[in-house]
Amino acid sequence: MFSLSRVLLDAAIDAKGLAGLGAGLAIGLGALGTTIGIGTAAGRALEGAARQPEMYSKLQTLLLIAIVFMESVAIYSLVVSLLLIFTV
């Protein structure tokens, strides 16, 4: 019979298994947070542009800068997960 708790327990015994679990959590949560942040920022920017169309170019510039900073979080979590996979 398949038991998830037994699989996690067996993986926890090995350091490589814990590193893989940490890597999966790092990239998964990092990507989830980035996706939520970008979606929220884009939605608010579109809402602001709909309310004040003359501010569209300024909003677009600010949105692109914000998206770059949010994507850097995803890149950092990718680097952390790759370090966990290949150094342990």
Image (cartoon, rainbow, N blue to C red):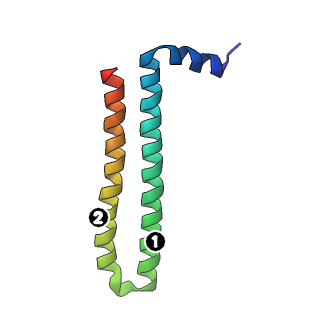
Left or right side of 65 for 36:
right
Report the residue at 51% width, 14% height from top.
13
Single out the residue that lies furthest toward the right.
Answer: 1
Left or right side of 87 for 35:
right
Q: CA distance from mark 2 to mark 1?
A: 14 Å
Frontmost residue, 50 versus 22: 22
Report the residue at 38% width, 85% height from top.
53
Give residue 69's position: percent from left, percent from top: 31, 57
Q: Is residue 42 above or below residue 54?
A: above
Give residue 3's position: percent from left, percent from top: 67, 18
Q: Dot 2: few (<14), some (14–19), or many (≥20) neighbours within 10 Å?
A: few
Element type where label 1 sits in the image:
helix
Frontmost residue, 10 versus 31: 10
For the C terminus, the image quarter is top left
Report the residue at 71% width, 12% height from top.
1
Element type where label 2 sits in the image:
helix
Give residue 80's position: percent from left, percent from top: 34, 35
Query: Residue 56: which numbered mark, if any?
Result: none
Q: Is residue 66 above or below residue 48?
A: above
Q: Earlier in the sequence, mark 2 or mark 1?
A: 1
Which residue position holds label 2?
A: 65
Amino acid at dot 2: Ile
Left or right side of 18 for 88:
left
Give residue 18's position: percent from left, percent from top: 46, 22
Q: Dot 1: few (<14), some (14–19), or many (≥20) neighbours within 10 Å?
A: some
Which residue position holds label 1?
A: 44
Frontmost residue, 12 versus 73: 12
Q: Please give the count of numbered marks on the rendered protein.
A: 2
Q: Are marks 2 and 1 in contact (CB under 8 Å)?
A: no
Amino acid at dot 1: Arg
Report the residue at 44% width, 73% height from top.
46
